[in-house]
Amino acid sequence: LAKTTQPISMDSYEGQEVNITCSHNNIATNDYITWYQQFPSQGPRFIIQGYKTKVTNEVASLFIPADRKSSTLSLPRVSLSDTAVYYCLVGGLFRGGATNKLIFGTGTLLAVQP
Amino acid sequence: NAGVTQTPKFRVLKTGQSMTLLCAQDMNHEYMYWYRQDPGMGLRLIHYSVGEGTTAKGEVPDGYNVSRLKKQNFLLGLESAAPSQTSVYFCASIAPPNTGELFFGEGSRLTVL
């Protein structure tokens, strides 16, 4: 199972770009990388997912180098409402696959200040 | 669609009592998961299921049992509750082969006195 390592916390100011990196050295060939956001007293919600190179959606970008042993979530121009815990999750959901056991890491608490 | 619904949302138990948490999803998802989250901590996988009638252990399965008799429901049971099981419990589901997202319920806050 691919274990993930993230910084425990990060601080930023409104309007800045924030990059959160996740290490997953033993990622498997079939594994995807997915990032989730969690606010207090709520379940995590999906932000973005990728397999390799770069993925962008309306809220974030995900950068994955060629060796796929790490990934970086990029949040452009953060606001106070982006204060949350961010988790990177590595796993592959295939029938009979080995990484259906989806284990979250400790997450990164992002604190955005005015 | 309701998505993933957890019942009950809040419960207080005394040590030694038993209870069952119900997770219901209306998205026809095959895979379902139970996590617990202690204050200020991350999510830890308790048990999961890859289909009706199948269950498997996660990271912290001791003290819990699960059942998946119907595809849409995943039950988490505590036979003899302990204070260490005070936590917020989250259920999630996903449909493989899928490169999309886990859908989470709103959580069930359990306190064991």
Image (cartoon, coloured by chain):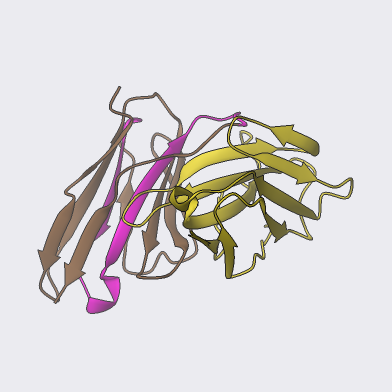
Q: Is residue B111 above or below residue A94?
A: below
Q: Which residues are magenta?
A: B70-99
Q: Quadrant of the N terminus of chain B?
A: top left
Left or right: residue A62 versus residue B14 is: right
In the depicted structure, whether residue B16 falls above or below residue B78: below
Residue drawn at (35%, 51%) of the image:
B90
The quadrant in which residue A10 appears is bottom right
The image quadrant where one finds the C terminus of chain B is: bottom left
Q: Nearer the viewer, residue A111 or A54?
A: A111
Residue ID at (36%, 69%) = B38
Residue B79 seen:
no
Q: Is residue B41 visible?
A: yes
Tell which chain the image draws in yellow: A
| Horizontal arrangement in the rendering, residue A101 relative to residue A98 (left or right) | left
Q: In the drawing, does residue B83 fall left or right of residue B54?
A: left
Residue B109 pos. (x, y %): 23, 59
Q: How many marks?
A: 0
Chain the render paints brown: B
B21 and B101: which is toward the camera = B101
Pinpoint residue B54: horizontal percent, then vertical percent.
Answer: 43, 42
Q: Quadrant of residue A62?
A: top right
Residue B90 is inside the magenta segment: yes
